[in-house]
Amino acid sequence: MTASQPRLASLLIDDQVCFALYAASRAMTGRYRVLLDDLDLTYPQYLAMLVLWEEGTITVTQLGRRLQLDSGTLSPLLKRLETAGVVTRRRRIEDERSVEIGLTEQGLQLRKRAESIPGRLCAVVGLSYEERAELIETLRRLTATLTADEEVPTM
């Protein structure tokens, strides 16, 4: 193997896509944590609020789909947001099995305070708009591929 040839199926940690994603995700979440302290939100709560700011009222099922979270993870998160006074939860009149999440006035005001976060984070990350868009598209393709109903090849 020459220096220009890639190492295939290497077991070196630095050659693992999963580790690069894991390390980047932890670093990104850590940067968000610092920015979100001022809003008194955790990173998962911030993600839920982003969807609510975008959609307005949404069912718990729809929110779970958007965030790729199950109801066991989502329910306590939403309960804490409700206790904080930024969202409301109520059973839908047309289907009492379904719960709607909506923003309170305080939740809408929180959006104004959060508007600077994406720009502040972009400044920290140091990617151009084009690089950022390319990275997002690559990660979306990766997610779509990994969540498709295809089996992993076996030896």
Image (cartoon, grey):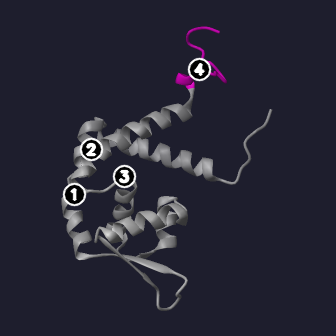
Residue at image coords 22%, 64%:
110
Q: CA distance from mark 1 to mark 2?
A: 15 Å
Residue at image coords 23%, 75%:
105
Of the numbered discs 1 and 2, the one sitting upstream in the chain is 2
Of the numbered discs 2 and 4, the one sitting upstream in the chain is 4
Instruction: Report the front residue among 66 and 103.
Output: 103
Say which element carries label 4: loop
- The residue that disc 2 covers is 34
Which residue ends up furthest to the top in the rendered image? Answer: 2
Residue at image coords 27%, 76%:
104
Instruction: Report the front residue among 129 and 10.
Output: 10
**Residue 81 at x, y = what percent?**
35, 66
Q: Is residue 131 left or right of residue 23?
A: left
Of the numbered discs 1 and 3, the one sitting upstream in the chain is 3
Q: Is 11 inside the magenta-drawn segment?
A: yes
Q: Is residue 60 left or right of residue 32?
A: right
- The residue that disc 1 covers is 115
- The residue that disc 4 covers is 12
